[in-house]
Each structure stands twice: as structure tokens, then as C-alpha cells.
């Protein structure tokens, strides 16, 4: 089903259009209706529809303004304009907006169906082009020669000598000249059995339904490559089971490379979801000053991916947002130690017990010396101390005061006691990290709410300004805000403004248009519309009722 939003300010016209068409029969689902352009814009951001059908004449934002907004934010969305005869000449002037279809009022349901089928055919042709197995395979074969792929993979697998990087990048025509470098990982979100739906007769089989992981990777790589080429930024390749983005910037300012990287990753995520019907989560690593350190950035990007367990998938996660990197420590190469670190940060006690069992597995029967055994325990404790340090926790809270308590290692009667001790201190650390994370979320929300309440009267306040004030990325802030506040930033800002409006209506003689300006609305009519929608009465009616008049 292709998602569709209908924007029309006349309720009877909207209901007539909805009732007269069997949308499912023609492959469409009306996910939302809007009675003005601003509502439609908000709905487009929420649903990312395939098609928007909009009237030209609407309050607060007309159809052409809405079309221009959609083209700038969601360029792949198809737009169908409904226009009256006297508006047609005006509508024709908007050709530069690349409107997909026009329908002249009055129109029959069959006329609209015919236009919808034309638009659907265009969408399916675009999807078919993206999913064409032969084209994808050929593009992959030609764009990623084996040697080039091996070199790029080696950059994120281990630390290479700078001279080797210079020689090979020159040999393979890969530009790695820059002052800032960053690695990101794009991972396909797991599709649980039962989530896919069998295609109806005659319908196109999506790449999601094939279950071919390699082909899905190639398709994502193709989309990512096109986007990077369009913006002349970044290099993408497949490494293991993920797509990797390497960012290189000649700018000295770190915000330039991170800003471009996040924008590219977000565009890739949206296009993959639109064209391939798949979702991906991207992890962005730390910024480094040498291509030789990209393997560290890649390791951080992989750790950022782990946080989808907390923040959810289908998003971009930056390691700097979720972990303090002030004291960055070298990552362990051993998979079991990495597994322990991940479990302490994000796992459950049950998972912790499983990991510790794996760590100790085989030691009872292995021929190890007492010294080897003590070194083994010290390695585990060292990894725990590293997690504690990165999280800002005091080691004494988990192991005891002073390193002299490591003498406990000599007091264990058997490995069973050592395992229980390890589990006990790890559990304490896990509780502390979880508590600190929740406290950090609360502190972040308190700071955000304080800033919003101090600046809500400014008409240009935005989520971008709030994030700039808090020094965090918008994607991370949006997910935390919605999780903690149970509403979006836009809804919260509107709530604060309308609460302020009620107070002003009760306590002052200001007119509605004066109050609108005072609380940050640039359009007094839109203020009245929002107020009535929220409280069921106009500002004037509310003022009279609150004063008993």
C-alpha cells in the first residue's frame, strides 16, 4: 500500500473524496486528512507519505506553499494539486515546483482514480529501478573493485601506517586528504518473522520480501552511493554485514564534518525506507584527526549501534550523544570482552550471567597456571573499571576502596566464587549506569523545558535552536524528548503557548491578535484555529466564559 495524505479545507469535499474511492483496491491508504496546509506539513513529517493530494486554496499555508515545503524536505513525495478553473493559470506558474499532476475542479471520482493510477505507475517504476537485481549487481561489481573494498575495510579494521594509507589511496584514486575524519555504520534492522506480508496477485515483490540480505545490502549501498555523489561528500562500502560511510573534511571545525555526516545518514535512512521498504539504524563514531585512526571511530560507531536497544531503531545515533568520550579508551579486540562491556552498559542481569559463564567457560579443565588465572581475572576487572570510568562512576563503589582490595583475588576458594563476585560488582555498576542515564535524561529534559518556557514567545524558536543551546544533535534530542515527555517537541511548544494564552485571556484586556503575537504566533488566525481545536472554543469565547460573562 502506498501512503497518501489528503489536504482540503472543506470538510464535505474531503469526506466526499474519501467515500467515493475504494482506496485499497487501487493500492493506496489514506493515512491522514488535513484541513489546512500547516496540518498537512506536520502530517507529512510524521508519515512520510508517497503521495499528497492538496487543494490550492487553504488557510495558513496554501497548496503551492505546501508543495514548495514538501519539495524541500521530502523531494520523492508525489504531489497532486486540486485547482479550480479560475486558479488554473496561477497553478501553471508553479511548474518549477515539479507538481506531478493537476486535477481541475469539479472532477469525478474516476478522474482522480486515473490520476492516482498514473502516479502509482511512476512510483512503481522508480522502485523497480532501485530494486533491479541486474543493475544493482553490475553497479556493485563496477563501483567496488575487490582491492579498493579491501583497502577501505582495512581502514576500519586496524590501524594502518600513514605511508601505506597515502600510497594505496593514491593507487585506488580515493581522496583521503583532510583534517577531520569520521566513520559511520549503517545496519539493516532485523525483520522478525511474520512482519512481511505476502504480495497480492499482480503486485510487485519488494526487496524486503525476498529475505536476500546481500541483495538488500547492495541496494542500500547503491542508494547511499547516489546520495554521497549528489552531495560530493563521503565514501561508502560494504564491510562485513553493514554499509560503512567514511567522512573526510578539510575544515578545522568539527561541527562541519558531523553536521554533513548526520544529514547524509538521515537522507540515506529516509530513502531506504521509501524505496526499499526496509529500515536501517546508523551509528556515527567520534571525529578523529587522522585517517589512521578511523578504526577507533568505527569501533565507536559500532558501540553507538548497540544503543538502538534503548533509543529504538530506524534512526541515527551518535556515540557522543549517548556516551561521554572525554576519556576515550582503546577498545578491546577480544569479542568476549567487548560483549561484557556491551552487556554492562545495555544488557540485563540474565544476559550478564550468560556472558560471565562464557568468559569462565573451559577454565576448569584447561591447564592454566595460577598466574594465568590471576591475569585472566585482572583483565575482566580492567574492562569493568574502564566501563566505570567512561560512565563517570567511582570504582570504589563497585570493587572497594583502593586498589589494595584486589587482594580479594587470592581469597577465592574456586572459580564459582570468582564468578559470583564478578557478577555482583557488574550488577552494581549496571544499576548505577541505568540510574545515571535516567538522571541524565531528566536533567536534559529539565534544561530543555526551562529554555522553551523562557523563549516560547519568540516566533522563530525551533528544535534546532534548543539543540544548539544544549549542544546535542536534533535526532538524539527528538527521541529522548518524545520518550520522556510522551509528546513531540512541536506539541509541547504549542501546549506551553496555549497555556500562556489562557492566562493572558483570564488576566488581561489584550485582544486575541495581541496575545497571538505575545506568545510567538506569527499568524493570529492560526492561533485562533489551534486554540479552538485544543479547547473547543475561540479565544474570545474562553475569555467571556472565564470571567462569567
Image: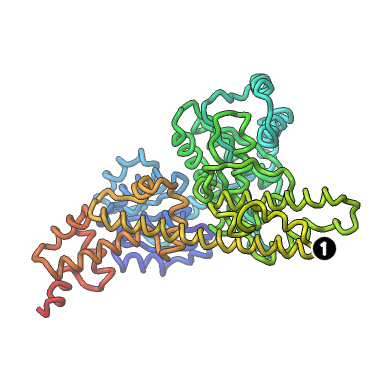
> Which scheme is used to colour this image of the protein?
rainbow
Q: Quadrant of residue 342?
A: bottom right
**Residue 385: % across, % down:** 63, 51
Q: Nearer the viewer, residue 439 or 532?
A: 439
Left or right side of 413 for 476: left
- Residue ID at (69%, 52%): 381
Name the quarter where the N terminus is drawn: bottom right
Q: Position of residue 89 (x, y in %)?
A: 27, 44
Give the labeled residue for mark 1. Answer: 414
336 or 102, which is in the foreground?
336
Determine whether, in the image, residue 367 is placed left or right of residue 183.
right
Element assignment for label 1 = loop
Q: Using residue 234 as the reference point, say whether residue 5 is left or right of it.
A: left
Name the residue at 31% across, 62% down: 35
Q: Residues within 10 Å of mark 1 (few under 14, many from 20)?
A: few
Is 277 located above or below residue 169 in the figure? below
Residue drawn at the location 39% of the way across and 60% of the way down: 488
- Kindly indicate the quadrant of the structure image that contains residue 357: bottom right
Query: Is residue 391 in sight in this rendering?
Result: yes
Q: Quadrant of residue 295?
A: top right
For the C terminus, the image quarter is bottom left
Residue 93: image x %, image y %?
Answer: 30, 40
Amino acid at each position: 500500500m502506498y501512503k497518501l495524505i489528503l489536504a482540503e479545507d472543506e470538510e464535505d469535499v474531503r469526506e466526499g473524496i474519501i467515500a467515493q474511492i475504494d482506496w485499497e483496491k487501487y493500492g493506496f491508504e489514506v493515512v491522514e486528512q488535513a484541513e489546512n496546509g500547516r496540518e498537512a506539513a506536520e502530517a507529512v513529517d510524521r508519515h512520510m507519505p508517497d503521495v499528497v493530494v492538496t487543494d490550492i486554496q487553504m488557510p495558513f499555508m496554501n497548496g503551492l506553499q505546501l508543495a514548495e515545503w514538501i519539495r524541500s524536505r521530502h523531494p520523492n513525495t508525489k504531489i497532486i494539486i486540486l485547482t479550480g478553473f479560475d486558479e488554473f493559470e496561477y497553478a501553471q506558474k508553479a511548474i518549477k515546483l515539479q507538481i506531478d499532476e493537476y486535477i481541475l475542479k469539479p472532477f469525478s471520482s474516476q478522474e482522480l482514480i486515473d490520476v492516482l493510477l498514473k502516479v502509482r505507475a511512476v512510483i512503481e517504476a522508480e522502485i523497480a529501478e532501485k530494486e533491479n537485481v541486474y543493475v544493482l549487481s553490475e553497479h556493485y561489481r563496477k563501483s567496488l573493485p575487490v582491492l579498493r573494498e579491501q583497502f577501505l575495510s582495512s581502514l576500519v579494521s586496524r590501524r594502518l601506517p600513514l605511508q601505506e594509507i597515502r600510497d594505496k589511496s593514491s593507487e585506488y584514486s580515493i581522496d583521503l586528504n583532510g583534517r577531520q575524519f569520521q566513520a559511520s555504520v549503517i545496519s539493516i534492522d532485523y525483520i522478525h518473522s511474520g512482519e512481511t506480508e505476502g504480495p497480492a496477485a499482480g503486485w510487485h515483490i519488494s526487496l524486503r520480501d525476498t529475505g536476500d540480505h546481500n541483495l538488500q545490502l547492495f541496494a542500500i549501498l547503491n542508494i547511499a552511493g547516489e546520495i554521497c555523489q549528489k552531495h560530493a561528500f563521503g565514501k561508502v562500502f560494504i564491510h562485513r554485514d553493514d554499509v560503512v560511510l567514511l567522512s573526510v573534511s578539510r575544515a578545522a571545525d568539527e561541527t562541519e564534518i558531523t553536521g554533513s555526516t548526520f544529514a547524509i545518514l538521515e537522507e540515506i535512512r529516509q530513502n531506504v525506507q521509501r524505496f526499499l521498504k526496509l529500515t536501517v539504524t546508523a551509528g556515527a563514531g567520534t571525529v578523529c584527526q587522522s585517517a589512521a585512526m578511523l578504526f577507533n571511530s568505527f569501533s565507536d560507531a559500532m558501540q553507538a549501534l548497540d544503543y538502538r536497544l534503548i533509543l529504538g531503531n530506524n534512526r541515527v545515533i551518535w556515540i557522543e550523544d549517548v556516551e561521554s568520550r572525554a576519556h576515550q579508551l582503546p577498545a578491546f579486540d577480544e569479542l568476549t570482552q567487548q560483549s561484557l562491556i556491551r552487556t554492562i552498559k545495555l544488557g540485563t542481569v540474565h544476559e550478564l550471567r550468560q556472558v560471565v559463564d562464557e568468559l569462565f567457560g573451559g577454565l576448569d579443565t584447561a591447564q592454566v597456571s595460577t598466574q594465568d588465572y590471576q591475569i585472566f581475572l585482572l583483565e575482566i576487572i580492567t574492562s569493568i573499571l574502564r566501563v566505570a570510568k567512561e560512565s563517570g562512576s567511582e570504582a570504589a563503589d563497585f570493587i572497594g576502596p583502593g586498589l589494595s582490595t584486589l587482594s580479594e583475588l587470592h581469597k577465592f576458594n574456586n572459580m564459582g566464587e570468582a564468578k559470583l563476585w564478578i557478577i555482583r560488582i557488574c550488577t552494581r555498576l549496571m544499576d548505577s549506569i541505568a540510574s545515571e542515564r535516567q538522571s541524565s535524561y531528566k536533567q536534559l529534559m529539565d534544561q530543555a523545558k526551562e529554555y522553551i518556557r523562557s523563549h516560547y514567545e519568540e516566533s522563530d524558536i525551533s528544535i534546532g535552536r534548543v539543540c544548539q543551546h544544549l549542544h546535542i544533535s536534533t535526532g538524539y534530542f527528538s527521541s529522548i524528548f518524545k520518550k520522556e515527555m510522551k509528546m513531540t517537541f512541536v506539541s509541547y511548544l504549542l501546549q506551553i503557548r496555549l497555556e500562556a494564552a489562557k492566562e493572558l485571556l483570564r488576566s488581561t484586556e489584550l485582544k486575541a491578535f495581541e496575545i497571538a503575537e505575545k506568545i510567538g504566533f506569527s499568524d493570529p488566525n492560526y492561533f485562533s484555529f489551534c486554540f479552538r481545536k485544543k479547547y473547543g472554543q475561540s479565544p474570545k469565547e474562553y475569555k467571556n466564559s472565564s470571567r462569567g460573562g
